[in-house]
Amino acid sequence: MAAVTDGGTGRDGPATVGPAGPGVRVAVVGTGLIGGSLLLRLRDGGLDVTGWDPDPTTRGHVRGWGVPCPDAVQEAVAGRDVVFLCGPLPTLPGMLARVGAATGEHCVLTDVGSTKAEVAAAASAQGLGHRFVPGHPMAGADRAGSAAADPGLLVGAAWVLCPGPAGLAAFRRLAALLIEVFRVRVVPMSAPEHDAVAALSSHVPHLLAGALAGAVQRSELRDAVLSLAAGSFTDGTRVAGGPPQRTANMLLGNRGRVLAGLADARAMLDELADALRAGDAATLTARLAEGRTARAALVQRTFAAHQREFPAGTDHAGELAYLRQLGAAGGHLTGCRLTAGAVTYTGQLPQTVDPARSG
């Protein structure tokens, strides 16, 4: 499957599908916000896609989109080339076993959960590690359910994929499909490294947003605070608007790493509080400057492109090392081209931001 990495009609337009694209048969299991958005994009890209959801009403919504949605999950995934598992985190290991048993050895399995180590371990224990690629699209909304699904939600997102030594062939196929249809930035990482990074980049921010919004909810001046809430409060509490149970599942699924990240954030808050209490303007300014530097690195990053080629049938250790080092360095893939004898990656590495030039 050769990835088309240029062109297209913009974020909200239909996907540009390469010669192999229309022949790929895909199933989406769990069609809420993420699964539904994924399914709609695949449908709009012209792929043969089926859906399934445990809720009969949701299955009806999917059929209303013009997508087949059988009542039995086994029927939905039978004969598929790729299956996306998009249910709640606690259900993924069990659903992986069901789908693995109902699909052939050629079928690539992946998920979209926000933690990776647990489901990766489950796949290995079930003998599916060679065709299961843990995944996590870094996109979402403060709504839930199929009614909130948007075919443009995942387009252009960072999408973590966790390649393993036994599953590189599956990783290549999935990366090529995602880049081709969703024009995503594929970030290759090991499952434990993803969970450590996601703790600070996503999970702890949910706790901080919930804490700030919760403090306002408890305040006797709540309505007055909300009447003055500007961009800093709105931006800082956006993710607090998500479904609480979904957020709780995410936090509990990565509990140890989230607690470690929360301790780091608490240490920084304590330093800020100590400086404020002491009237220490120099320390307060210095700590705030650290945050400003990280923010500047986020919004001003530029990337340099490169290409790396590996033989398709050998040297998997070198290929795996390259992919994981790319992700650990803050890089991503924008191309994955497969030929009979080789795989060629187009990688992007971030360039250093000079804090002195951040304005």
Image (spheres, rainbow, N blue to C red):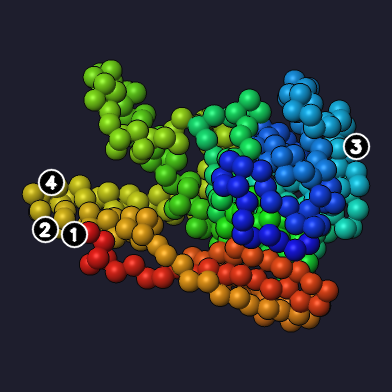
| Residue 286 badge | 1
- Label 3 or label 4, whichever lies nearer to me, is 3
The answer to whether one can see residue 263 in this image is yes
- Label 3 or label 1, whichever lies nearer to me, is 3
Q: Report the residue marked by disc 3.
A: 75
Q: Report the residue marked by disc 4.
A: 277
Q: Secondary structure at mark 2?
A: helix
x and y percentages locating residue 221 in the rendered image? 24, 19
Task: Say which amino acid is labelled 1.
Answer: Ala
Neighbours of disc 2 within 10 Å: few (<14), some (14-19), many (20+):
few
Alpha carbons under labels 4 and 2: distance apart: 13 Å
Neighbours of disc 3 within 10 Å: few (<14), some (14-19), many (20+):
some
Alpha carbons under labels 2 and 1: distance apart: 6 Å
Residue at (35, 51) in percent of width and height: 265
x and y percentages locating residue 349 in the rendered image? 49, 70
- Label 1 or label 4, whichever lies nearer to me, is 1
- Label 4 or label 2, whichever lies nearer to me, is 2
State if disc 1 and disc 2 touch (CB < 8 Å).
Answer: yes
Of the image marks 3 and 4, the number of the one nearer the N terminus: 3
Alpha carbons under labels 3 and 4: distance apart: 63 Å
Of 53 and 152, nearer the camera is 152
Q: Secondary structure at mark 4?
A: helix
